Image (cartoon, rainbow, N blue to C red):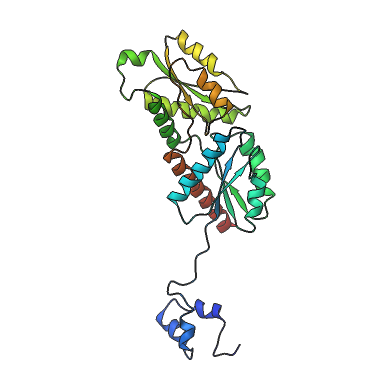
Amino acid sequence: MTASHPPRSQSRVHLDGTAHLMESTSGEPAGRLRLVSPAGPRRPAPPALVLVAHGSRDPRALSTARALMARVRELRPALAVHLGHIELNEPLLPDTLAALGDTPGILVPLLLSRGYHVKQDIPEMAAAAPARAHLAAPLGPHPLLVDTVYDRLTEAGWPTAMDAATRRTSAVVLAAAGSRDPDSATDTRRTARLLAARLGVPVIPAYASAAAPTVPTALRALAARGRHRVAVASYFTAPGRFATQCAQAAPWIASAPLGAHPAMARLILHRYDQARATAQAELASA
């Protein structure tokens, strides 16, 4: 390479001013100028977004995860979005991460609270990935989740207006999967408080397994307090055995799982952006 033909990387370095531009193009053939974009070097692609679903034997769960992935892609078409499962469904998360190669990823759990999967399973899978993978926070608690639960309740028949007498006999059981991790219950109670403020009636968190109270126990406790008009709000991302069991216990109405609600897609991208900003800050301070 002669002095009159510097490497392309050098010619790009001096394009931030008129004087430098004149220096870098002095003696260059006109064809070389077309190789340099007026906008300068391309910015690197953002990390891929990897949706991390739990996995289920119910085929509706996989359909829901794919529908959520499609909504996220509609909101941000330039972003690479992938899906991986902790168990039971393909692709499994380690396979999804391996397929990324050296592309960094942000893992967004389709989980509604902290627990063993968020604290142990997913970080271990991320640590074994060939590329750098950062874990985002679980989806809950967050006001966008409350928006979703509220919409699902109104779709099931919850009145948007309620007189004082009806309000005194009404309540909601927020039915969640349950976990032995106390942080999971803390997160679910936070969502219940947010939903109670939105509805103006008591909202009691209850669980399908591993935690107390169960949905039937919560319903009995509310009935003892004179709350007989009780809805069961499904606090599950997708349909499945637990969601079905909780809905069947409802004495009045039961809402559908959160599913591919538009607010869920916005929340996924919000968690992605939060985690990406944290990752960039860590790299800058390293």
Q: In the image, what residue occupies the spot 46% across and 72% down? A: 40
Residue at 49% x, 84% y: name it: 32
Q: Going 42% across and 27% down the picture, which residue do you hit? A: 195
Task: State left or right for residue 168 relative to residue 184.
Answer: left
How many labels, in total? Answer: 0
Outermost residue, right side: 128
Q: Residue 198 appears at what percent x and percent y?
A: 38, 28
Work out whether 128 lies above or below 189: below
Q: Is residue 20 above or below residue 208?
A: below
Q: Is residue 138 visible?
A: no
Q: Quadrant of the N terminus?
A: bottom right
Q: Depth check: 60 or 31 in front?
A: 60
Q: Could you say which quadrant of the image residue 47 lies in? A: bottom right
Q: Position of residue 136 (x, y in %)?
A: 55, 44
Query: Can residue 267 be spotted in the picture?
Result: yes
Q: Position of residue 79 (x, y in %)?
A: 50, 54
Give the image location of residue 27, x and y in percent. 48, 91
| Residue 103 or residue 66, whichever sits in front | 66
Outermost residue on the front side: it is 59
Q: Quadrant of the C terminus?
A: bottom right
| 138 up-or-down from 13: above or below | above
